[in-house]
Amino acid sequence: MKHRLSLRNRYRIAASLLAGESGSLLDIGARDRRLRAYLDPERLQYVAADTVAGLDHQIDLERPLALADRTFDHVVALDVLEHLENLQDGFHRLARLARRSLVISLPNMASARHRLSFLLGGRLATGKYDLLPQHQGDRHRWVTTIPATERVIEALGAQEGFRPAAIVDELDGPPPLRLALGVLRGLRLATRAFAVERSVHLLVRS
Amino acid sequence: MIESCKVRGTKYELVGRLLHDERGRLLDLGARDRRLRDHLPGDLEYRSVDRAPGSDHQWNLEAPLPLDDQAVDVVVALDVLEHLERIHDAFREMVRVSRRRVILSVPNDARLGQRLRFLFGFGFGDKHAVVPQHPGDRHRWLIAPAQMRAFLAGNLEARAWRIREFGLISGFDRPQSVIGRLPLSASLSAATLLYDLTRMP
């Protein structure tokens, strides 16, 4: 599988992977429906889902879903799976909802920013792994790193009849850092795991 | 204020020393092969708890303990809390059922050796790995000393408990053995953090 580098954010990357596609699209973990702004409404019928009420569907991937298999043409889950205790079952549940394709993104916690933060402070560059005096409820429950995440998504996808069609890597950090890491990566002076903030995977039904 | 010091040896040996003068009932949570029992004074009545068969009690530590308040004298939980999603509830349960002492240990994920491993792309090891099959038992939290101290302070009644921290510098591997000998703080050099909590009269 060839990886493509991108300076764009995960929403734009997901939309570009689905450019030219049509049908219904379920955005799991949709929050403020930000993805919708990047999609072509003439081609894709956007449906939003999250664990909280107020969107089109209330879905908790930790539990069996009430929706029938293959309800949507496309299912998108951007930075969702790492929040689940049972990431593997969560993947199977969302994959079964998709008739044609899946777009999954996972953060890469081994990127340059996180390594530097952990070296200097013993803490990743995000509060999502912190042990706080009170349980924070929503948090990252897995330390997702490239290339382990790629192997896991491929293996889980294969179990559900999907094959990887594309992987787009979003570069890490604010724009100047992204540019620098892009150059380093282009010159093969940095590994993917070092340079990339997250990978966006497109899987299609075999 | 938490007292802190560095020590050598295993966690079992240290617990044995700390409990040398204790008497009464001791509950060993996550006891596994009951190895701790070999290091305890004979005056302590030992009871083991684990998920697997073979222990005195098969209890799920993600749920409330089926014991009254202060039902035992000492609760020990060595390298257990980091396995639990409901780490806060589990800790409060340990405190609730103990009359005098709670001794617990956690891995120091922010030790220098781990920081260097992570810097060079070696991750956090198998216990944090993302794999295609859910492993069941795994480490669910990254434990850093400063956060662990805040966690303890935030979940104990103020001035009701004395907290002592021990940084166990003995290593799991050769780099840790070297780092353990360096003149660094316990937060950086300890592979394991052990906390001895004593209920104040």
Image: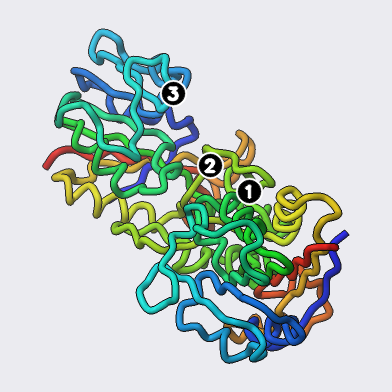
Residue A51: % across, % down:
41, 28
**Hey, which quadrant is residue A199 in on the image?**
top left
- The earlier-in-sequence mark between 3 and 1 is 3
Q: Residue at x 84, y 62 (%)?
A: B200
Residue A148 shown left or right of residue B16 in the figure: left
| Residues packed near mark 1 inside 10 Å, few (<14), some (14 to 19) or many (20 plus) | some
Q: Which residue is mark 2?
A: A139
The Cα–Cα distance between marks 2 and 3, rounded to whole angstroms, is 15 Å
* Callouts 1 and 2 in the same chain: yes
Asked whether the residues under the numbered discs 3 and 1 touch, taking CB atoms below 8 Å apart as contact, a structural biologist would say no
The Cα–Cα distance between marks 1 and 2, rounded to whole angstroms, is 8 Å
The Cα–Cα distance between marks 3 and 1, rounded to whole angstroms, is 23 Å
Residue B70: % across, % down:
66, 61
Residue B63: % across, % down:
47, 53
Asked whether the residues under the numbered discs 1 and 2 touch, taking CB atoms below 8 Å apart as contact, a structural biologist would say yes
Give the answer, above or below, for where B182 lies relative to A123. Answer: below
The residue under label 1 is which amino acid type? Asp
Q: Residue at x 46, y 54 (%)?
A: A145
Q: Which mark is residue A52?
A: 3
